[in-house]
Image: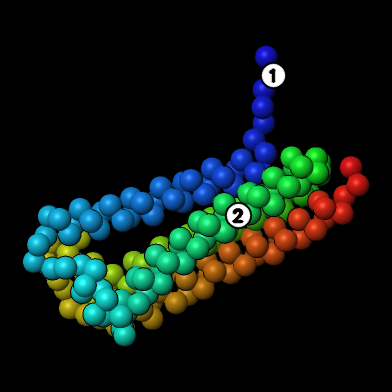
Amino acid sequence: MKTTELRWVDRFIIAAIIQGAIIAVMALVIVAIQVTNSDINIIQYLSLSFEGTGKWFFFGVIFHLIIIVAVAVTALFYSQLEITLKKKFSKKLHVLAAIHLIGMNVGGAGSMMIMTYAGLAGTGLLTVFTEGKLGPKDPAIMDSFIEPIGGFIALLAIGVMCGGLGFVLAYRNNS
């Protein structure tokens, strides 16, 4: 019986599916809270808070969706290398691809989920999820999220740079 090993294209597709499931669950939770709490229109409240911390929620969600698409598109690059061009990955290329996968998924999704959370916390809307009522706005809370978001974005950047280097090296590899 032949065993098939996961290729990098497969790993990136699986990661995109998992990321899509995560954001779908986040959306379902917000919809469920909205359905069970008719006192507050969550999306309307956030959109009215857009000049403040509410924009962090929207940017977090939008950029998370962009990360998901980027991970899926990245799978096409690995498909080109692994399937179409039949390039063999050396140990060094496997390490670069692993850093790429982790950087994009942990760094990208982590920073965007923190942005989303910070937007909910800063608008006071987070207390709807925890206490069932709207809390006070606290724009100063955003200051405590800058370093974690920056750290995750640095991980994202390292992952993308390693992936780009890996693509070039694999493409130039004559095997």
* Mark 1 neighbour class, 10 Å CA radius: few under 14, some 14 to 19, many 20 or more: few
Q: Residue at x 72, y 61 (%)?
A: 164
- Give the image quarter of residue 30: bottom left
Please report whichever mark, 1 or 2, sits nearer to the chain's N-terminal start.
Answer: 1
The amino acid type, in three-letter code, at marker 1 is Lys
Query: x and y percent of residue 170 in the render?
Result: 81, 51
For the point 17% across and 64% down, which residue is it? 128
Horizontal relation, residue 131 to residue 156: left or right = left
Helix, strand or loop at label 1? It is loop
Q: Residue furthest front?
A: 84
Residue 116 visible at all: yes
Q: Residue at x 57, y 52 (%)?
A: 72
Q: Position of residue 130 (x, y in %)?
A: 19, 60
Q: Is residue 124 visible?
A: no
Q: Residues within 10 Å of mark 2 (few under 14, many from 20)?
A: some
- Residue at far top of view: 1
Would residue 93 appear left or right of 63 to someone viewing this image?
right
Residue 126 point in image, percent of width and height: 23, 67
User: Is 7 located above or below residue 120 in the figure?
Assistant: above
Task: Decide which of 147, 153 is in the foreground and name it.
Answer: 153
Residue marked by disc 1: 2
Q: Residue 33, how many percent across, how many down?
A: 18, 57
State the count of labels. 2
Q: Identity of the amino acid at label 2? A: Val
Residue hosting label 2: 73
In the picture shown, does residue 1 fall above or below 137? above
